[in-house]
Amino acid sequence: MIARQQRLSGWGGVPVESCRVARIASRGPVVEMITTATPADRLIGRGLGRAYGDSALPADGVVADCTGLDRFIAFDSASGLVTCEAGVSFADIIAVFLPRGWFVPTTPGTKFVTVGGAIAADVHGKNHHRVGSFGNFVEWIDLLIADGSIVRCSRHAEPELFFATLGGMGLTGLVLAAAFRLVKVETASLRVRYRKTPDLAATLAAFDAGDAGCQHSVAWIDSLAGGAALGRSVVMQGNPATLAEVPSRGDPLRLAVPWSKAIPFTPPLSLLSPLAVKAFNAAFYGLHADNEKIVNIESFFYPLDAVRHWNRLYGPRGFVQYQAFFPRAESAAGLPRLLEAVVQSGAASFLAVLKSCGAADGGLLSYLEPGHTLALDIPYHPRSVPDLCRRLDRILLDHGGRLYLAKDSLMSAATFRAMYPRMDEFLAVKRRVDPEGRFVSAQARRVGLAS
Amino acid sequence: MSFHATAGGESRTVILCGATSAVAVALGRRLAVRRWRLHLLGRDVGRLEALAADLRVRGAAAVSCSPFDAADIAGIPAAFATAAAMLTPLDGVIVCHGLQPDEDGRLPSPDELRQSIDVNFTSVAILLSLAAERLAGRRGAFLAAVSSVAGERGRQSNFCYGSAKAGLSAWLSGLRNRLQRGGIRVLTIKPGIIDSPMTAGLAVGPKALIAAPDAVAADIERALLRGRDVLYTPWFWRPIMAVIRAIPEPVFKRLRL
């Protein structure tokens, strides 16, 4: 197994580290790597690198790049159960199955994530209030554990390992393959209702009023609006469009992928200055009218996929994404405090997304419960941003909230422990399958999940 | 990657040799989306079967596989007969296997030289001869093989590989000439540097010149459907190689290419 030296970071571009990277394309070599390596050789799996921080950066070990594990294994067209290797991306799945009338059961805001990554982060989408996280659709996982054996875990076989691996950030072992259910769709479109809300209370009320009647629900928040307009939003709520609702010309199952644009290099400074973001936000809020439209899946779920490497817009310093969850009873009090702290700091957030969440997911480190989750992009600055995030962490802790590991790059071990009450249950499983702490990321070491 | 499951055109029946190479995998996936019927040949049957399952899920109308070792020259007729018996009637054969020895700064050993010529030239020529016999009378059938821009001119850095590919390109040109009247097309594929396991670990060249396997596969797919003769992929290798061929030998022999 050849390990190449490569500079890697998460999607936020901070931190950047020079890593040894081993490209995994089949089971044999990686099993051999695990069984012949010494206990000091640590490993962390990596997919398409869409976790924002240091989740897929090594703690002085090797990064196992799993994108070469890209084969489908089987598909059952009666139940929608698809079996594939861990490096298959949501983009692959959609390309193969959407034309046949199947779609992923839930999806993050980019289709450039792997199945292995989706399991490790137990990703959620705009339909969490209805169906929960991706893990709810996973039947089984083939996991390579530290002793070199491959364990097929599910709700029935090795359930503890299964629920530690869902949301377990790759720390129980390397996901090699999985089986999960797709859902039937009639068209590649959604019928989406757009509504502008003047403040946070109205935004939360719009979720309460509309969520029961819609599969997908999300609000874009103008994170720079303060005072009486704090939390003003465009709320988007949609349902899968039926055949009768879409125009009859053209293929109704066609994914409308826009002409691919790319940011070719990292500009010397951030192009998303506070002024530029303020202008964009004002225009976005101002131009949206209350209406209902038929929207293609691509532009509803993946608007940012249209610009490859959009993360480079933040310049060489990069950015962090702060994704905060508040339990339902605390949202109305906690969210304004968090938004005010961000507005006061002057840190412009280009992307600010609020959504409501449903029942708690099964993973021991799964992120969401009934409540609301707010995601903010914050341009990174080494002097101000760590302090700002610590202030935000305190607000979150006051209200019983938590941070999403797939986005985090700064949280302390004490904060993590306070936010994740099932941490000790997780660590008990990890110590059983990985007693020497072979599967470790930089993040795991920072937040106290290393062993 | 194409986002259409049922792209236009009829389903065809094809043998894909060297099927687990990076370019062949990408090409096989594109042909699977077109619902073609495929027979895979390669050394590692385990990997062939995994790929066959992948191609079935992706939409191929039928996929089978059997073993093939390009270094075992005597075994090629039997391996081809097995493959051809699985898929009838046969519409085409695409050969993607190759062997790039690490010849940086030294002359190849006799064994390396023989192996390079066996795998890169002799095995392909034998396979395509057998295929040409089998396809005789089938107008519209095709043969295709991956040669290389390295065969355009012998360079000090890889002429063990390059000379075998030069032989292959000449052989394909002659075969095309011979089969023209029978209505059988022959495609010579000349890729530049591809980002693949075959080139991993070799000091290959500037990043801008390295192509993704799927980009090369997309070019091959288009060339097959359009019935082209010679494909340079990516396209910029055609002018680059025109320049390299035009350099006078007294100058060329002094260059470190």
Image (cartoon, rainbow, N blue to C red):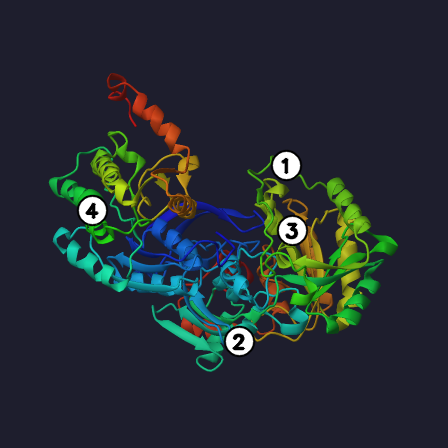
CA–CA distance in space, label 1 to label 3: 20 Å
Label 3 sits on what residue type?
A: Pro
Label 4 sits on what residue type?
A: Val
Q: Are marks 4 and 3 on the same chain?
A: no
- Closer to the camera, A422 or A84? A84
CA–CA distance in space, label 1 to label 2: 44 Å
Ranked by sequence position, the earlier of labels 3 and 2 is 3
Residue under mark 4: which chain is it in?
B
Between circles 1 and 2, the one closer to the viewer is: 1
Label 2 sits on what residue type?
A: Glu
Q: Which residue is mark 4?
A: B119
Quarter of the figure with residue B78: bottom left
Residue under mark 1: which chain is it in?
A
Q: Are marks 3 and 2 in contact (CB under 8 Å)?
A: no
- Closer to the camera, B186 or A125? B186
Secondary structure of the residue carrying tag 1 is loop
Residue A397 visible in rendering = yes
Between circles 1 and 3, the one closer to the viewer is: 1
- Closer to the camera, B194 or B197? B194
Q: Which residue is mark 1?
A: A269
Q: Is residue A224 above or below residue A133?
A: above
